Image (tube, rainbow, N blue to C red):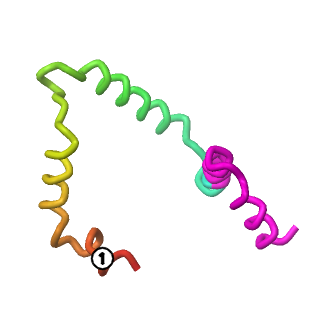
């Protein structure tokens, strides 16, 4: 089957099925590494445990967004010029 036919069929799928398809395809390009997956899971567990403690405090989305924007506004990769 040609890639163009597959693409036509794929774009007609519901969004959840397309997301699953994309994930599966990406895993064929870069298979998951058990060591890295375990490290990410451990970090996620640690961060979840730290949530609400002095080690990790929540930041309101609006404030975080402003902070991120101020840091990246002059960064080529985050500017409109860097978006291809």
Q: Position of residue 21 (x, y in %)?
A: 68, 50
- Compared across the picture, whether 80 is left or right of 21 comes to left
Is residue 24 inside the magenta stretch? yes
Give the residues drawn in magenta, as a range: 1-25
Q: Quadrant of the C terminus?
A: bottom left
Question: Disc 1 on helix, strand or loop?
Answer: helix
Q: Would residue 14 be counted in the magenta stretch?
A: yes
Which residue is at 18% across, 28% downward?
56
Q: Is residue 75 above or below residue 68?
A: below
The number of numbered discs placed on residues in the rendered structure image is: 1
Crowd rating for badge 1 (residues with CA inside 10 Å; few <14, some 14–19, many 20+)? few
* 32, 45: nearer the viewer: 45
Residue depicted at 17% across the width and 36% down the height:
59
Question: Can you give x and y, in whole percent of width and height, for residue 37 in the image?
Answer: 49, 35
Q: Quadrant of residue 11?
A: bottom right
Q: Is residue 20 left or right of residue 45?
A: right
- What residue sits right under mark 1 in the picture? 80
């Amino acid at each position: 089957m040609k890639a163009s036919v597959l693409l036509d069929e794929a774009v007609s799928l519901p969004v959840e099925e397309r997301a699953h398809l994309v994930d599966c395809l990406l895993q064929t390009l870069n298979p998951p590494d058990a060591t890295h997956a375990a490290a990410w899971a451990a970090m996620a567990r640690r961060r979840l445990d730290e949530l609400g403690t002095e080690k990790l405090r929540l930041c309101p989305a609006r404030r975080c967004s402003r902070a991120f924007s101020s840091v990246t506004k002059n960064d080529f990769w985050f500017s409109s010029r860097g978006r291809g």
